Image (tube, coloured by chain):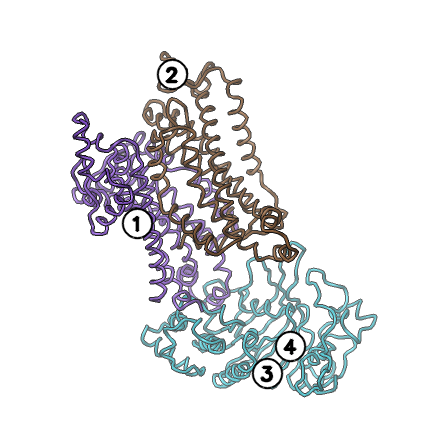
Amino acid sequence: MLYFIGHRLLYLVPVLLAVSLLTFLIASLLPGDLAYVILGDQATPEKVEALRRDMGLDQPIWWRYLSWLGHVLQGDFGRSFRTGQTVLQAVTERLPVSIELMLLAELIGLAIGVPLAIACAVKAGSSFDRFMTGAAFAMLSVPAFLSAILLIYVFAVELRWLPATGYIPFAEDPIGNLRCLVLPALTLAFAEWPGIMRVLRSDMIATLQEDYIAMAKAKGLKPARILFVHALKPSSLTLVTITGINIGRLIGGTLIVETVFALPGIGRLLVGALYTRDLIILQGVVLFVAAGFVIMNFIVDMFYAVLDPRIRHGRA
Amino acid sequence: MAVLDIGIDTAVVSPVKRKRRVGTLFWMAITWIAFMGVASIFADLLLAHGPIDMDMLERRAAPSLSHWLGTDGLGRDELARLIHGARISLTVGLCAPMIGLSIGGGLGILAGYFRGRFETLVVGSMDVLLAFPPLVFALAVTAYLGQSLFNLTCILGVLGIPAFMRVARAATLSLAEREFVVAARALGASHARILIHELLPNVFLPLLAFFLLGVAVTIVVEGALSFLGLGVPPPAPSWGSMIGEGRESLELAPRLAFIPAATMFLTVLSFNLVGDTLRALTDPRQGAL
Amino acid sequence: MSAPALLSVEGVSVDLPTPRGNLRAVDQVDLRVAPGQTLGIVGESGCGKTMLSRAILQLLPKKATLTGRVRLDGQDLTRLGAEPLRKLRGRALAVVFQDPMTSLNPVLTIGSQLIETLQEHLEFDAATARKRSIELLAAVGIPAPEHRLTQYPHQLSGGMRQRVAIAIALSCEPKLLIADEPTTALDVTIQAQILDLLAREQRRRHMAMIIITHDLGVVAGRTDEVAVMYAGRVVERAPTPALFKNMRMPYTEALLAAIPKIDAAPHTPLPAISGRPPDPTRPIAGCAFSPRCRYAMADCHQKKPALASAASSDHQYACFHPIHAAAGACV
């Protein structure tokens, strides 16, 4: 088991390094002399030169990369020249919002997708099943910003039940916080549940045809137990993988939703940094997001092994 | 990595085409796509108004004989903007995946055929590209290169390369061990000949199916970027930017957001349907409906 | 057959709709098993024996239709509701499937699969169920039973897995155990052990048993009565000694002859039954075996013989021109 983990970890490192390099390159290649941008109308050639030397901008690119990487490994991601915040501060401020949104979205997606999948698998081939499968397929063609507009129109404009934009921290007002997050989470969940439902449904249909399910019936077990213990567990392998991948994907995917609903999350931090050419923030946040994605995949791999004991014991 | 593993395990190519009926939905989808295509090509001949002609007296006008779908917030004809938006969305939607298909597909076939260190290199670099949230990547590079139709197409094309690579590689891996490849090699066929004559025809169909799905995804991503104002630069109409603008008028004239939204939805759905049907025809294990 | 039957299968037929037409998997089968008795059902693959066992358990696929009656201890199973049926299964009526790798759930521990049956039918609490499970595993000959409770099926050998399946089947003291090809998926060396285990447990618990197999050798000496099936029908039925001493059906003779003999001279051709089993969607007018029967005459191809008996009432066969053959006679 340890060998399995170690092997995967080893692969992780070069990928993370490459990601950091790519991030740095993108940030560095953005046009506009940084020093000019910072100084604004106070810019004179001498001041620009001085600032450039100060910030190390006159050094060759590989030196700057290694220097940045060195700082990163010590936990120093840099400081935004606009806001004065360190990257870590900005990220830790915004991250909880995004994470809350992501988790809520995935939870709602599961709450919709899993029961539907089980119901469709049990009634496979029926008109209910066909209708739901078709609905899931159609849902996949609805992008996030479309669902967002629709939800805003129905719930904020017409019914006026929920706010269209804005955010209240959980600590301040839990109910208000959830009210602000319902529409954005629903928007994301709409894009999640079809994938979840499809995957679980097809796995369950296959599992329900297995001999051990016939055996469980022959043992006279309660149908609920057969469904949720005997059938669900072996079918959930792909589901867990997909959920993990989804959450990982959501790390970068909350961008649109955060912008539409004006939530102070990582995505908006990123877009803001792009507009204001705040390179330090940009580099740090992109690195965070990409690294998070890679690590999430790694965790999914590990979880896979937990769920299927055959993998744990080296593929019997 | 888990993402990669799924790609290898589940893509299996069956060179024999099953005799499957394609449903009415499939043909409806084809019809819609054809209709959109024809409309966008002949837009200038058919439309009475241009997409950027503003008529300040007729702002947010309801549908009428002179403006079949009404006008938007700046008095521009909705129908004209819709069709021109189709032109842009379809152009990006078709061209960008071509880049992915040619470069990604090519790399995938080569990687799957030659294996070894070349394959590890290709797969590894694709992993790195995949590690990047695509929207973030697109935004960053747009900021670098500037907003334009051409740049957008290139970026989205590049973003699609890893996915096409995976599909092509998986298909090639399962084929490369088959008898007809081994037989060709035994007959002394060169690598190029095997690649072009044996592998390519069999890998073609699943790649085509994936291409159509890629078109759907590209239209969505372009729409999202334009929605944020970071895609095709104004005043050129794109479905995404129309929806974004329509958002401002949700209370007064919701149709300004929903008409382009419905059109985009139908187009994306059609491409998904056609692509998925093709995929089900060539690879029963992956069929969805 | 003076004792009242525990299981009585009366005129059971199973029909399956297929794209190629109706498939009659089981055709008018009558069977009786008395308490404590063992019945062997023998036939080639596709003769309907597995469908018959599913019919008895009332676990047929959704599309199948069953006609006839299945009575267990007087109760008509075909008329019973889902809930009473569920209570019967695993309790009064138990089954052991062919392949223990697929009949045991791979992601649940051996222990949980044993304990859940005990808790469901006998309403044991966790501790009692656990203790009982260990006793059961020991009774079927599994070493270190406590250790096994937390193991998964893939960690055991094929023979051990089948022992576990038997333990599960026996756990609630069933009145009737159906063993569907219990040794087919196992090594030859293990087969005898498993069959002996089944026989021993059956005697100990005075349990009725049905052994379904394609191998006549399996039922010899281990069953009280044998029913031979072909193309969905019972074609010969007799007490086991009588069957082997005095076979009437050419098919039964051919089946026995097809078993390779260890003491045959080297290079003896293996007598296989020529031809193939009939297509169940295209039943023929005459006897289903007639195309392959070496004794077939004109009337065999025209009419179907009914299952009837000539001399003794407990030896029945369906043949117009029965033979007289004995096991051990030269091929």
- The letter of the brown chain is B
Badge 2: chain ID? B
Between B144 and A127, the one lying in front of the other is: B144
Give the quarter of the figure containing the N terminus of chain A: bottom left
Image mark 1: chain: A
The chain coloured cyan is: C
Q: CA distance from mark 3 to mark 1?
A: 65 Å
Give neighbour class at mark 1: few <14, some 14-19, many 20+ (Cα, 10 Å): some
Circle 2: element type? loop
Q: Nearer the viewer, mark 3 or mark 1?
A: 1
Chain label for disc 3: C
Tell me, for residue C227, which label it has, or none.
4
**Residues at circles 4 and 2 in contact by the CB criterion of under 8 Å:** no
Q: Label 3: state its secondary structure.
A: loop
For the point 39% across and 26% down, the residue is B242
Residue extending farthest to the right is: C298
